Amino acid sequence: MIECRNISKGKAEGELIVSSEAISFLGGVDPETGVVIDPNHELKGESIKDKVLFIPGGKGSTVGSYVIFQMMKNNTAPKAIICLKAEPIIATGAIMSDIPMVDS
């Protein structure tokens, strides 16, 4: 068991997908499919739809929050997000989209 700080309330269960690299939702993830499309990311070609996404953090544009929201509307979002260090872009997207999120 690990102790976490709650960023966006909720509970979720699902398959865990882990990345050692930060992710940019704007341009890095296809909101229509939930597939990572960043050609330089270790998860390229992997779907994060309905998964518990474990990442060190986010990167990129503030528009990434709206990409996460669009993913929720498209039913392609992750079920939950675990970050080592939350940052405002992903935290805002998770809160707007009611996606449970924690960090350490």
Image: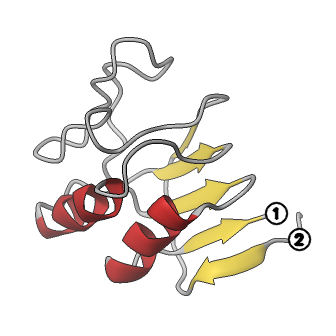
Crowding at label 1, few (<14), some or many (≥20) Cα neighbours within 10 Å?
Answer: few
Quarter location, residue 92: bottom left
In the foreground, 1 or 21:
21
Q: Position of residue 78 (x, y in %)?
A: 38, 56
Residue drawn at the location 81% of the way across and 71% of the way down: 4
Crowding at label 2, few (<14), some or many (≥20) Cα neighbours within 10 Å?
Answer: few
**Which quadrant of the rendered structure holds the C terminus?**
bottom right
Q: Is residue 81 above or below residue 30?
A: below
Task: Provide the secondary structure element on which disc 1 rests.
Answer: loop
Quarter location, residue 33: top left
- Count of numbered circles on the image: 2
Q: Position of residue 90 (x, y in %)?
A: 48, 61
Q: Is residue 13 visible?
A: no
Q: Is residue 46 left or right of residue 6?
A: left
Image marks 1 and 2: residues in contact by CB distance under 8 Å: yes
Q: Position of residue 28 (x, y in %)?
A: 32, 32
**Which quadrant of the rendered structure holds the N terminus?**
bottom right
Task: Provide the secondary structure element on which disc 2 rests.
Answer: loop
Q: Is residue 88 left or right of residue 48?
A: right
Q: Which mark is residue 104?
A: 1
| Residue for badge 2 | 3
* Circle 2: residue type: Glu
| Lower position in the chain sequence, tag 1 or tag 2 | 2
